[in-house]
Image (cartoon, coloured by chain):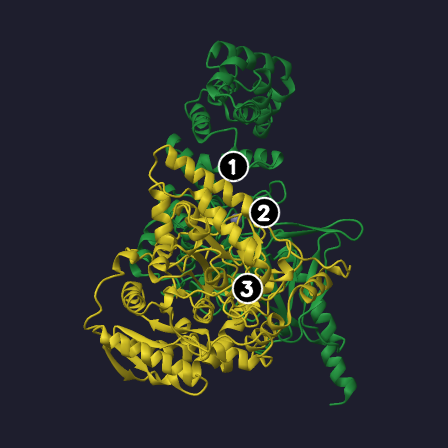
Chain colours: A green, B yellow
Amino acid sequence: MSDTAANVNAAETEYEPVVGMECHAELLTNSKMFCGCRNEFGGEPNTRCCPVCTGMPGALPVMNIQAVEHVMRTAIALNCSINPHAKFDRKNYYYPDLPKGYQISEYDIPIGVTGWLDIEVNGQPKRIHIRRVHLEEDTGKLFHVAGDESFVDLNRSGVPLMEIVTDFPPDIQSAEEGREYLTRLRSILTYIGVCDGKMEEGSLRCEPNVSVRPVGSNTFGTKTEIKNLNSFRSVYKGIEFETQRQAELLRKGERVVQETRGWNDTRQVTFSQRSKEGEEEYRYFPEPDLVPLHINEDWIERVRASMPELPDARRARFISEFALPPYDAGILTDTRAVADYFEETARLCGDAKTTSNWVMGDLAKLLNASGTEIGASPITPAALAEMIGLITDGTISGKIAKQLIEEMYATGGSPKTIVEEKGWKTIKDSGAVLAAVEKVFAANPNIITDIKVKGLVGKRGFLVGQVMRETQGKADPGEVNRLIDEKLAD
Amino acid sequence: MSELIHLSALDLRDKIANGAVSAREAVTASLQRIEAVESRVRAFITVTGEQALAQADKIDAMRSAGETLPPLAGVPVALKDNMCTRGVLTTAGSKILHNFIPPYNGTVVSRLVESGAISVGKTNLDEFAMGSSTENSGFHTTANPYDLSRVPGGSSGGSAAAVAALETPLALGSDTGGSIRQPASLCGVVGLKPTYGRVSRYGLIAYASSLDQIGPFGRTVKDCALLLNAISGHDPMDSTSTDVPVPDFAATCGESIKGMKIGIPTEYFGAGVSAEVAAAVRTAIAQLTALGAEAEECSLPSTEYALASYYIIAPAECSSNLARFDGVKYGLRSSELAGHIGLTEKSRDEGFGREVKQRIMIGTYTLSAGYYDAYYKRAQQVRTLIRKDFERAFEKYDLLVTPTAPGPAFKVGEKADPLEMKLADICTIPVNMAGLPAISVPCGMVDGLPVGLQIIGKAYDECTLFRLAHAYEQSTGWHKNSPVL
Ligand SMILES: [Zn+2]
């Protein structure tokens, strides 16, 4: 084959991505990884630290057992085995935000190994294998200000951080699968209460490494790692961009450089941050200030017993127990907070499908519009259940309910009180409804004729609408229909 | 008042407790002695006279108020300057910490305060406890009180010299490869390295974490036992401190040693150990058998690899432990502006001494990818062999007896070759590698210079150590020697 022919072929090659995922989750613990300092986001710089997390000479780490159990929970949820003799190591490197000059991490014997997470893309199930789940500590933060000065904030230093790494060879083969993996992972982490999953605040960080290869090939190309992705969308876009960029390079006969690339969210592109060619040198060795962890079966069982129902199991139960469509069950079990909210409301009002519609529809819209988490919703499950009860027993119409839920959301008031105050009760008085029907008939003789004479029954809906309008939506729809039918039959 | 400085800690404590002497008098005597001899001995980096007197007055007020006094109430003590003391300069003997004032007390420091002991100051050491003579101190060299032209040993040379020169009856040191026992031997005092895990390391500026252990100096075995009682016990702040009961060590001093089985490992009398030292130790062993102990030659075949593997493990841990001194948070910061990497490089270059830099470089090298297995991992395997040697020996013997140091105190500047200097720890290093307790007690004089006897015990069996050491000491009287200053 001549060079030209080869180039033509190269230019036409289709490429597919191969994606490994490295995720870091800040753990929801009361205190930091190795000291008693409060583990909380933010705070005035350097107010949440002590001799241990500022790396004072002579200070020593003490293991936070709550953090260890969070990692055990995650390992169990991700079907990993748990190492009975997990140990900690020092990862040595210099950076001003790393006060000890080393990070305490787990190198060769992590707490959790070889598990999996099942995902579904376009109805196709896929198993993503997990290589390891380990525990380490977070660094501080460095702030560069104008001029020659930089400042270090050590509030985050020593916050427990869990790393979850997918296995090699990677199972993820598209941006869509990458996003789905992360969605499921976040869902599990928030379910079991080990991480709040806030990507914008950095409490869940994801660094995909992406390489491409000709479709159908079994080889692996040079990979790049993408950093600064702070939303599901950016993870998707980042992988997609990297795939295109690398394929483009290869088609032009150029090579991919092994490096870390940052994500520019404004321009929707990755950019070169630092080259990773050559071995990284961290001089790992066992942390002599900590004793190895002995995790026996009893301990694992205790942790397992304390685990909540996981998203997959709950989705299946919502389908079987509440007869929800799989689509509804999927959305409602996405986060534990939504699932808890739904389940409580459905139990209180006894109508799961209607609850599902309101939670996924109007309530979700209101929460989104005000950027509120469902846990902080001004409408409690009890209030929503009461509102659904009012619809079911005919006290209000569905149309009124749409106004009612907005009022409830804005004021936090009880639905019964609001309906009472606003006079939104359905008009059950047949006399009042009949008067409205008669008024509408009198005002629309042509329509009546169209229906009665020309048989254009489609226009009957117009009459219903007019009557509802006449009664400000308060008329009982059943009664309206009955009276209109009676009158047309005259 | 000057006779007070000759008292043992035990006698001084009793006199304070019964009101014969006030804590202020005891502390004043110590401070006056420091004033009188420090220009020659130079045991201290910092003397905290005012704080010590204020603390003494508190003890005296307690006694006036009829309160029960804690066990070491009013007894002056000196602290090696690698133990963090809140509000008091703590340098670790390094220029890189020339201005470091810790915001917290190490656990031993808090326990000393609870025990009523009064710190009169911080003593000199080889920089970051790396050395055997205090010549590596970033500030000055301490003199041996028996011969001011000689070294006191190290790295806890300041603490050993302070006790030998009667500046304080007690002192704390730290021992990573012999840093308490070797200077105790060279200065003619008693020094004990407890079992690894017996005493909290929280607040001890780390040299090699898996080997470092804090321990007491005194002029008598019983004084050391008293001080060890004050600082021992599990500390939730140190994961490597062990949760085992702390017996009354002092109470075991005085019990008979009849029938006690003692092993004499031949490897500790080999090349490098001077004939005079070997002879003094042999004489001491004869004395022990005269007291009813049964002594027998034995072998610890892995001993010859101890020094080499120690000089892999200790520098490896040190290279990581000393990474925190980067000029960012505390200590020396270079005035040269060179970006954050340059800042760290310049500060470390200006702050660390030669020996420390050398060990950091060795440790960095041996931990590097591709070398780890050949060095660090192998050294850890040797460590296991050394530990097993001791385990086997202790199936047969209650204690092992050896020289503490291969020779008496050497001249300042005499051991210019760093390897020769390192051989000073040849008898003490294996004990740290195995995490065992060992004590050095004076056992004779060679050319007017003290020689020490090392007694090695089973893990957590300091009691048996104290029994033998006390019986030996009381039957010989070497502890009554003191230098002419
Ligand atoms: Zn802290």
Mark positioned earlier in the residue sequence (1 or 2):
2
State the residue at coordinates (79%, 49%). A146
- CB within 8 Å, label 1 to label 2: no
| Residue type (three-letter) at the residue carrying disc 1 | Ile
Answer left or right for B259 relative to A76: left
Tag 2: amino acid: Asn
Q: Name the front one of labels 1 and 3.
A: 3
Q: Which mark is residue A450?
A: none
Q: Residues within 10 Å of mark 3 (few under 14, many from 20)?
A: many
Gap between marks 1 and 3 measured at Cα: 61 Å
Callout 2: 10 Å neighbours few (<14), some, many (20+)?
A: many
Q: Which mark is residue A155?
A: 2
Q: Residue at x 55, y 64 (%)?
A: B125
Give the percent coordinates (x, y) of residue A194: 46, 49
Residue occupying the point 62% across, 35% down? A369
In the picture, residue A269 is in which quadrant? bottom right
**Given the image, on which type of amino acid does mark 3 rest?**
Leu
User: Would residue A183 be visible to someone looking at this image?
Assistant: no
Number of the label disc, if any, that sits on residue A374: 1
Q: What element does badge 1 sit on?
A: helix
